[in-house]
Image (tube, rainbow, N blue to C red):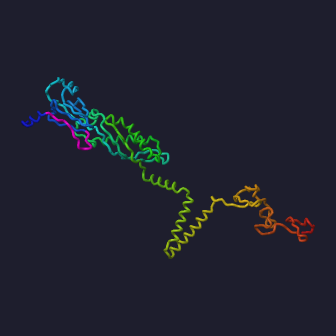
Amino acid sequence: MGIMDFIKGQFIDVIEWVDSSTDAMVWKFERKGNEIKMGAQLTVRESQAAVFVNEGQIADIFQPGRYELSTQNMPILTTLKAWKYGFDSPFKADIYFVNMKQFTNRKWGTANPIIRRDSDFGIVRLRAFGIYSFKVDDPAQFLREIFGTNPDFETGDIEGQLKRQLVSGLSDSLAESKIPILDMAMNYDELGTEAVAGLQPRFTSLGLKLVSLYIENVSLPEEVEKVLDKKTQMGVVGDMKTYTQYQTAEAIRDAAQNEGGGVAGAGVGLGAGVAMGRAMADAMKPGEIMSAKCANCGANMPADAKFCPECGKSTVHEKAVCVKCGVSIDKGAKFCPECGSPQQAVCANCGASMIPGAKFCPECGTKA
C-alpha cells in the first residue's frame, strides 16, 4: 500500500448516499477493508435507512438524520465487539443504504387467461392488467430475505417475483368474487382493495409493503366480445318489427334514388316494390286491432268480440241450412251466400211470406 493510500485511510469518513436513479433499492458504502473510522459522519436522508452489518450480523439501523459514529451511538455493535467508550479503533462493518420511498407505476398483467364461471356467459377466460406500487417496510427483513450482501439492488431484481405473486392472488380474487362480468368494471376499486388486503402477508414476509393495486381493465376473449356487441346492438334496436320496417323503408328510398338505368335498375325497382308490399302486409298483421260495428246498436267494437261492449248483445249469429244447397248460413238470411238461392218463399196468391219448404200458404191456404 502506497503512502497516499495510507494517508487517505486516516481521514474521517463522510458516509452518505445520493440516489440519482429511480429504481435503486439498495446501495452499499464501499470502504477499503470495511474500516470505518471512529467519529465518521453518517447522513441518512429522508426516504432512506442505513443498515450496519458486522461480520454477517445486523448491528444497527439508522433512520433519517445526521450521526457521528461512536460506541455511544452504536450500543448494539459495542456489545457485539465488547468495545469500551473511547476505544480508538475503526469499525469493521458493512453499511447498506436502503431506499424507503414508494416505487410507483409498476405494471402487472396476466400472462395466461383466468378461467372463471359467469352467470351470463358460462365458463369464460379473462385477462386483466393494471399498475401497483410498493415500498420497503422492514429494512432488516428485506436484507435477510432478499438482497443479502448484494452491493447494488434494483426493482428489476425482484419485480418478476412480485408480479407473479400479484397475478396469483388477483386470480383468486377474480375467481371467488362472483361478480358478473357485465358488472366487473364498476367494481375495479373494490377488487383492488380486496387484493391488497389478501396479498399483504406475502409482501410482509419479504420486508415489503404493497401500497396500492389498480385494475385498469378486465377483458374477455374476442369471440365473447363479439357476442356481447351483438347483444348490445339488439338492446339498442328494441322492437325488431319496427326496426325492420324502418330498414325496409330506408332501402326502398335508396333504391328509388338510384339513378342507374337498364335491366339492373328495373330489377332493383321490382325488388323494392315487392319489399314495399311485404312491409305493408306485415304492418297489417296481427298486433293491430281491427274493428267492427254492432248489428244491434251500431257501436264500434273489436272484430273478434263475442258481445257488444255498448249494448251487450251477442254477436254470434244463430245458424240455419240453405234450402237448396244445404250449407250452413246465418239464421234469417234472405239469400244463401254459397248458391244465391232465396231462403224465404212468397205466396203466389196473396204475396205473404212462407216458411221454406211449406206446401200451403199460412195466410190464404193456397197450395205452393
Residue depicted at x 22% and y 25%: 75
Q: Say whether residue 68 is left or right of residue 205.
A: left
Where in the figure is residue 33, as x and y percent of width and height? 14, 34
Q: Say whether residue 368 is left or right of residue 133.
A: right
Residue depicted at x 20% and y 30%: 54
**Which residue in the rendered view is the most extreme toward the front?**
66
Specify start and end residues of the magenta stretch as a single range: 12-25
Residue 23 in the magenta stretch? The answer is yes
| Image vertical order of residue 111 relative to residue 257, above or below | above
Residue depicted at x 9% and y 35%: 7
Most prominent secondary structure in the magenta stretch? loop
Where in the figure is residue 29, as x and y percent of width and height? 19, 37
The answer to which of 59 and 359 lies nearer the viewer is: 59
**Which residue in the rendered view is the most extreme toward the right?**
365
Location of the C terminus by quadrant is bottom right
Residue 218 in the magenta stretch? The answer is no
Where in the figure is residue 103, as x and y percent of width and height? 30, 42
| Image vertical order of residue 322 relative to residue 211, above or below | below
Q: Say whether residue 124 is left or right of residue 337.
A: left
Location of the N terminus by quadrant is top left
Instruction: Determine which quarter of the picture holds residue 324.
Output: bottom right
The answer to which of 167 and 131 lies nearer the viewer is: 131
Where in the figure is residue 332, as x and y percent of width and height? 81, 63
